[in-house]
Image: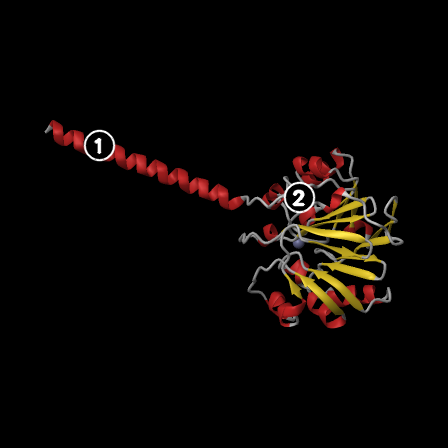
Amino acid sequence: MRKKLRVVSFFIFALLLIATYLIYTENENLTFNVVKETPRCVNSILDNPTQTTGNLSVHFLNVSQGDSILILNNNQNILIDCGPNGKGDEISAYIQGLGISDMDYLIITHTDADHIGGCEEILKNFNVKMIFMDGQVKDTVSYRDVLKLIDKEQLVIPDVCFSTNIGGGMIQFIHGNVNSENANQNSLVLTMKYGKTSFLFTGDCDSNCEKSLLNQDLEVDFLKVAHHCSEYGTTDEFLDKTTPRIGFISVGKNSYGHPTDGCLSRLDQKGIQVYRTDLNGNIILGTDGETYWISSEK
Ligand SMILES: [Zn+2]
């Protein structure tokens, strides 16, 4: 009888051990899946000033809730995101008003409608030479409509650390698709250097995406605040690492509470000046690579 008891106790003990192990490894896997480290870019473009060619301008367009940012230098241009559905023609008119009919790079940071929505009109209205996307596939009308208009030869899914030039400046992709179920966390994130000035464009990379970037060289002058200044990003840690002078928030009427009080107060506490498309309208930042100037509609 005692022997039987001992055998039963042994089995119960063994089962408990196995259960503990399974719970532990499952949690470990969960943690592992959440924050995926991006490779550190050894040759960061932020390290060296670029040769300048006149002035470079960055236009944060007021597209209500969504992103659309135009960069111009030396007859070359980049458009980062196309705003939400219905905004593509408005953005096109703005760009055409500047005498532009060919687009060098269209960068679609991720597949959410407030970034890809207006791209259908952009692709119809411009001769776009190269399109950068994060490679996510999404079952939405906006995504399918845009994909229909893209030739394979135009499309690049950039590797992390890939860099290329824009006029006299350089851009470098420092984050890409990590196959997260949350599209924001797969955002293409890029840095740009022009002369001595530096920029960080974050798409909607907040929370875990932002954490995964902390190993990168991130010190910049100008920050496109991630995810419309949501509560889940723009942490104190991230701001200490990026040290921007000025933050730009692309935001409009929305039901998410963007920009959140917490995000705005973190920017304020670090002494970062903020421009918002909902309050300032279209915002233009100009630089000659040394100094900068900002103008806005409002
Ligand atoms: Zn967004």
> Does label 2 or label 1 sit earlier along the sequence?
1
Residue 267, percent from left and from top: 73, 38
- Which amino acid type corresponds to the residue marked 2 in the rendered image? Val
Report ligand 1 position as a quadrant: bottom right
| Residue 237, quarter of the rendered image | top right
In the rendered view, tell whether residue 33 sits above or below residue 61. above
Give the amino acid at mark 1: Phe
- Toward the viewer: 258 or 220? 220
Q: Position of residue 227 (x, y in %)?
A: 67, 49
Q: Nearer the viewer, residue 145 or 276?
A: 145
> Toward which corner of the image does residue 3 lie, by quadrant?
top left
Q: Is residue 30 left or right of residue 146?
A: left
Furthest residue toward top:
2
Q: Is residue 15 visible?
A: yes
Q: How is the image coloured?
A: secondary structure
* Circle 2 Cα neighbour tier, 10 Å, few/some/many (<14 / 14–19 / ≥20): few
Q: Secondary structure at mark 2?
A: loop
| Helix, strand or loop at mark 1 | helix
Identify the disc placed on residue 66: none
In this orientation, does residue 297 appear?
no
In percent of width and height, residue 13 lies at 26, 32
How far apart are the alpha carbons under marks 2 and 1? 53 Å
Between 177 and 138, the one lying in front of the other is 177
- Asked if the residues shown at circle 2 and circle 1 are in contact, with their CB atoms under 8 angstroms apart, the answer is no
Q: Identify the residue under disc 2.
A: 42
Q: In the rendering, which numbered label is found on residue 10?
A: 1
